[in-house]
C-alpha cells in the first residue's frame, strides 16, 4: 500500500471536491455570510501562500483570536494545511493571561477578528514574538492608526489580494503538530496541549462513528462550541469530512440569536455546553415558536442537570446526547449513542472505538472491579496527550493511561458517569463529601437553574460544603427549601452549612461553572493563590 499521510487538510479537500456547493454559514452583523466548501477551500489555500510570504515556516505558531466565523474556519485550514501550528486563543481571557500563553507558545503571527482588535494596544507590547498581525474581518479600529502594531498588520482581504498564492497542502509527516490549545484553567494553571495531524485525523474518524456524533451529508450542524476550545470539539474537521452544512454563530450565543439560526438554517444537529440551550429554551418560552428541523443536541463540558435534559427533550422534541471529554483528549472520550439515550440516565455514554478507560484507586492501582464502583478515571488512546507543551515530563502511567483527575463509575452496560473532580472533593471531619452527588440532587429541583457545591475552610471540621444556586428565571427559592430537598437523600453531615443564592452563576471561558471564582467569592480562597496564572 502507498503511504497516505493522515493530515487534516484532506477533510476540506474532500468537501471541496465532492460537496463543493454545500455551505458554511456564519452569523454576522445584519445577517449571515454564506460560502461553499469549494470557494472556501480556494481562499484558505491561497491564504496559506500569503502567510508563507510573510516569512512563516512549517512549525511556526500562528495565534488566532476570534469567534466561530467563516474567517476563523479559513484560518484553521490555512495554517494547518501549510504546516503551521494553529494556536487558538480564548478571547475571554485577560490581556495578561493571553500574553503569558502567547509568549510560552512563541507565536510569530496573530490572526484577530476586528471586534477584538482593541485588545492589541495592550496585548502586543507584552508579546515580543509577534511579528505580524492579520485582521480576519472588517477594518482596523478607527483609533488604532497611531499604534505601533498597525505597521505590521494586514487586513485579511488585502493580504489575499496582494500575496495570496496557491500552495500544496499536507506535504509533511502526519506526526507534526497541527494545533495548540491551552486547558481552560478552571481547576488549575492552564497547560498547553499540542495536537498532531494524525491525532486530529484519528479523532475525526472516531467521532463520526454511528454510535458517536454520527454525522452525514444530510445534516446541518450548528457548532456552538467555541473554536478556541479543544478544536471546537473536532467539528471543524468532522463536518466537512462528511460534506454536512456548517453553521457558525459568530460572537453572539444568546438564546435569541441561537434560536434564529437554528430555525432559519434548518439545523438538524446542535452542539455546545448545556448553558447555551438553557438560553434557547428560555427565549422560546418567552416569545413562543418551534424548531421543527432540530433532531439532536449534543452536550458536554460539565454535568447537565436532569431537569434541564428533560426540559430540552420535552420543549424542543429532540434527542439529547451526553458526552465527556477533555482538552487533553482532542477532546472526546465517551459519548451516548444518538439512538439509545434513555430518559433519566445521566451517563456520558460508552468509550468510542479508539480509546479505552479504566478505574483506579487514588494511588493508580487498577480496581479489581470496574463496574458499579466509583474510582479515579484514566484513559488511553491514539488521541490522548503524552505530555504537556514545553514539558519534558510524561503524563502517562506505565500502561499508557492518562490520569484525568475525574472520579467516575461505569454501569453494567459500560456507560460512564462522571462523579466529580477528585480535587473538588471536600474533606470534612476526616471523611469525604462528593460535591457532584449533591449537585445532581439539587439540580433536579424544578426551581433550580444552575448549581455548584464548593468547600469552605472550617476550624472544627477542616472543610464544610457551601451550596451555590442560580434560581430558574422568575421562580422564588428559599435556602431552607433547598436544604429540606436534600434531607434524607444524602447523609445529614453532607448537607451544606451555607446556601448562596446568586442572580447569575459565574461561568468560565468554556461555559462551565467557574468553581475557582466561586471559591474566591464564597469559599475564602484567594483566586491568585489557587491559580496564579489566571
Image: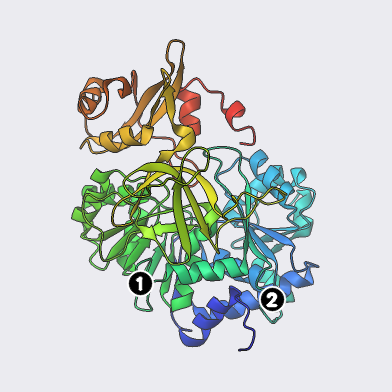
Q: Nearer the viewer, residue 70 or 371?
A: 371
Left or right: 91 with respect to 444?
Answer: right
Kindly state the secondary structure of the residue where label 1 is placed: loop
Task: Name the outermost residue toward the front.
Answer: 368
Q: Which of 298 and 92 is in front in this view?
A: 298
Q: Where is residue 17 in the image (x, y as percent from the top left)?
A: 52, 87
* Quarter holding residue 137: bottom right
Query: Could you tell me which quadrant the N terminus lies in?
Result: bottom right
Task: Name the outermost residue toward the top.
Answer: 460
Q: Position of residue 308 (x, y in %)?
A: 26, 46
Kindly state the secondary structure of the residue where label 2 is placed: helix
Q: Position of residue 436 (x, y in %)?
A: 36, 36
Task: Compare marks 1 and 2 and give the one earlier in the sequence.
Answer: 2
Position above or below: 414 against 466: below
Q: Which residue was labeled with disc 2?
A: 161
Which numbered disc, 1 or 2, marks the residue closer to the eye?
A: 1
How crowded is the residue under tag 2: few (<14 C-alpha within 10 Å), some, or many (20+)? few
Q: State the separation of the CA atoms marked 1 and 2.
A: 42 Å
**Can residue 417 be spotted in the picture?**
yes
Q: Which of 80 and 96 is in front in this view?
A: 80
Task: Name the outermost residue toward the bottom.
Answer: 1
Q: Which residue was labeled with disc 1?
A: 210
Position above or below: 528 against 48: above
Left or right: 450 with respect to 311?
Answer: right
Position above or below: 531 against 268: above
**Can residue 34 be spotted in the picture?**
no
Residue sitting at x 45%, y 71%: 239
Position above or below: 383 against 104: below
Amino acid at each position: 500500500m502507498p503511504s497516505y499521510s493522515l493530515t487534516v487538510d484532506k477533510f476540506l479537500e474532500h468537501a471541496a471536491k465532492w460537496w463543493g456547493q454545500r455551505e458554511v454559514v456564519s452569523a454576522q452583523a445584519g445577517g449571515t455570510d454564506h460560502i461553499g466548501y469549494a470557494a472556501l477551500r480556494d481562499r484558505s489555500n491561497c491564504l496559506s501562500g500569503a502567510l508563507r510570504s510573510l516569512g512563516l515556516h512549517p512549525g511556526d505558531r500562528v495565534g488566532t483570536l476570534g469567534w466561530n466565523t467563516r474567517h476563523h474556519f479559513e484560518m484553521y485550514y490555512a495554517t494547518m494545511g501549510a504546516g503551521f501550528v494553529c494556536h487558538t486563543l480564548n478571547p475571554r481571557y485577560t490581556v495578561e493571561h493571553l500574553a503569558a500563553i502567547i509568549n510560552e507558545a512563541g507565536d510569530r503571527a496573530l490572526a484577530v477578528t476586528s471586534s477584538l482588535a482593541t485588545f492589541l494596544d495592550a496585548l502586543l507590547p507584552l508579546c515580543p514574538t509577534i511579528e505580524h498581525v492579520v485582521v480576519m474581518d472588517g477594518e482596523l479600529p478607527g483609533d488604532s492608526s497611531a499604534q505601533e502594531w498597525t505597521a505590521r498588520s494586514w487586513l485579511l482581504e488585502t493580504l489575499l489580494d496582494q500575496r495570496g498564492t496557491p500552495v500544496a497542502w499536507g506535504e509533511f509527516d502526519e506526526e507534526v503538530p497541527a494545533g495548540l490549545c491551552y486547558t481552560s484553567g478552571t481547576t488549575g494553571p492552564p497547560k498547553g496541549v499540542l495536537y498532531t495531524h494524525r491525532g486530529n485525523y484519528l479523532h475525526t474518524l472516531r467521532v463520526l462513528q454511528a454510535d458517536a456524533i454520527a454525522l452525514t451529508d444530510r445534516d446541518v450542524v450548528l457548532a456552538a462550541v467555541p473554536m478556541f476550545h479543544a478544536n471546537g470539539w473536532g467539528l471543524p474537521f468532522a463536518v466537512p469530512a462528511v460534506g454536512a452544512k456548517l453553521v457558525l454563530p459568530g460572537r453572539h450565543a444568546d438564546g435569541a440569536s441561537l434560536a434564529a439560526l437554528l430555525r432559519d438554517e434548518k439545523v438538524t444537529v446542535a452542539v455546545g455546553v448545556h448553558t447555551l440551550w438553557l438560553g434557547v429554551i428560555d427565549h422560546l418560552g418567552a416569545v413562543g415558536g418551534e424548531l421543527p428541523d432540530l433532531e439532536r443536541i449534543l452536550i458536554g463540558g460539565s454535568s447537565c442537570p436532569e431537569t434541564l435534559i428533560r426540559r430540552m427533550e420535552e420543549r424542543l422534541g429532540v434527542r439529547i446526547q451526553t458526552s465527556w471529554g477533555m482538552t487533553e483528549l482532542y477532546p472526546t472520550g465517551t459519548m451516548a449513542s444518538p439512538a439509545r439515550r434513555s430518559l433519566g440516565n445521566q451517563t456520558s455514554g460508552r468509550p468510542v472505538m479508539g480509546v479505552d478507560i479504566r478505574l483506579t484507586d487514588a494511588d493508580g492501582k487498577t480496581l479489581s472491579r470496574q463496574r458499579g464502583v466509583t474510582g479515579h478515571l484514566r484513559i488511553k488512546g491514539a488521541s490522548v496527550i503524552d505530555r504537556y507543551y514545553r514539558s519534558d515530563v510524561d503524563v502517562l502511567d506505565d500502561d499508557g493511561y492518562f490520569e484525568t483527575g475525574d472520579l467516575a463509575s461505569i454501569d453494567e452496560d459500560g456507560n460512564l458517569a462522571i462523579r466529580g473532580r477528585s480535587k473538588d472533593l471536600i474533606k470534612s471531619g476526616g471523611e469525604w463529601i462528593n460535591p457532584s452527588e449533591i449537585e445532581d440532587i439539587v439540580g433536579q429541583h424544578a426551581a433550580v437553574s444552575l448549581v455548584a457545591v464548593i468547600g469552605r475552610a472550617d476550624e472544627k471540621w477542616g472543610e464544610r460544603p457551601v451550596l451555590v444556586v442560580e434560581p430558574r428565571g422568575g421562580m422564588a427559592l428559599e435556602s431552607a427549601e433547598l436544604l429540606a430537598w436534600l434531607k434524607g437523600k444524602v447523609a445529614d453531615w453532607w448537607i451544606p452549612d451555607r446556601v448562596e443564592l446568586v442572580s447569575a452563576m459565574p461561568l468560565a471561558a468554556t461555559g462551565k461553572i467557574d468553581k475557582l471564582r466561586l471559591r474566591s467569592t464564597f469559599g475564602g480562597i484567594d483566586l491568585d493563590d489557587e491559580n496564579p496564572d489566571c
